[in-house]
Amino acid sequence: MQQDFSRAAEGYDAAAVLARETGTRMAERLDYVKIAPARIADIGCATGDGIRELQRRYPKALPLAIDFARPMLYATQARTPLLWRITRRAARLVNADVRALPLAPGSLGLIWSNLMLHWLSDPLPALRELQRTLEVGGLLMFAMLGPDTLKELRAACRAAGIAEDALPLRRFHDMHDIGDMLLAAGFADPVMDMEMLTLTYASPRGLLTDQRHLGVSNALLGHLPWRDWRRVFKTYAAQYRQQRVPASFEIVYGHAWKTQPSIIAAPRMTEDGRAIIRFETLRK
């Protein structure tokens, strides 16, 4: 997948509508958080929209743009305002995997990750690494895809005769499972919420083209013989005749804090021994 993201760097921005929208909504959540981090990091920074937003909000903080695809870091550098480069405000670029960050323990005050963690089959090791690098009192904020992503395409696969156990689309973790992982990683008071965002296309090929430009078509759509995909796309389009084809994405938002170990060791529990996680409903 690293090679796919690397190849996508040049055309990424043109297709990154969803990432920009979720980034905007994540930033709005920061309006209600009073923090003054000394060091901030965008993990899975892509072309740098997130780290530039964080720099505008926290101009005194040391910014780190972290991605495992080097071309994405080069694109981040190229999109940095000239004045920031001249005044040495440009983000420090770090080529690294989120599961093994070359950062000291407790070195970050705020970690931001927009639509990256869901590409990991098991996010728990990454969450543990993020918890390690946060300072006490530091905040993790993220967005990731949930299990109802591309529900229309999944339905088209079933309608086209693809067996349930052969559905090619990637399966994503439920927000309740992510909340449990945050607790297991040592975070305190995780807060989770979700919403559905829908993009529309003139045809299913528009969705496929976007995912290719983003470098995630193989990871998101999986693999079927081309004849099967043609049948699925024909079924998909037929369900929305004379309409634009919808593609829904379940967006799971989360944030959690790193607190003193003594507090983390005793999370709030129900009487039957289950950890308490707060979930919020988004209202439009």
Image (cartoon, helix red, strand yellow):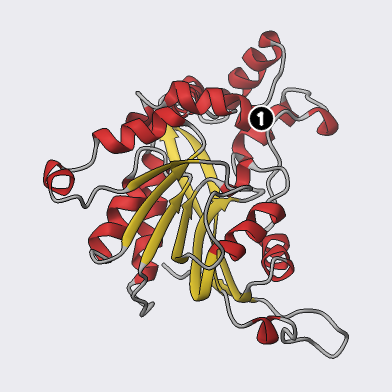
Q: Which residue is mark 1?
A: 156
Q: Can you see residue 195?
A: no
Residue 112 x/y as whole percent: 45, 58
Residue at screen point 70% across, 53% down: 125
Q: Quadrant of the C terminus?
A: bottom left
The quadrant of the picture occupied by the N terminus is top right
Q: Residue at x 62, y 51 (%)?
A: 146
Q: Position of residue 105 (x, y in %)?
A: 56, 64
The answer to whether 247 is drawn above or below residue 206 in the figure is below
Q: How many marks?
A: 1
* Residue 42 visible within the image: yes
Left or right of 122 on screen, residue 21: left
Please determine whether, in this image, residue 223 is positioned above or below residue 250.
Answer: above
Image point 44% across, 66% down: which residue? Answer: 110
Residue 85 image position (x, y, % from top left) = 18, 44
Query: Badge 1: few (under 14), some or many (20 or more) residues near its Cα, within 10 Å?
Result: many
Say which amino acid is labelled 1: Ala
Answer left or right for 220 relative to 9. right
Q: Looking at the image, which residue sits at the far bottom?
A: 271
Q: Is residue 56 above or below residue 209?
A: below
Q: Residue at x 54, y 23 (%)?
A: 3
Q: Nearer the viewer, residue 157 or 120?
A: 120
Residue 50 pos. (x, y %) = 36, 51
The single residue placed furthest to the front in the displayed view is 104
Secondary structure of the residue carrying tag 1 is: helix
Q: Residue furthest right?
A: 272
Horizontal side, residue 130 vs residue 93: left or right: right
Observer-nearest residue: 200 or 252?
A: 252
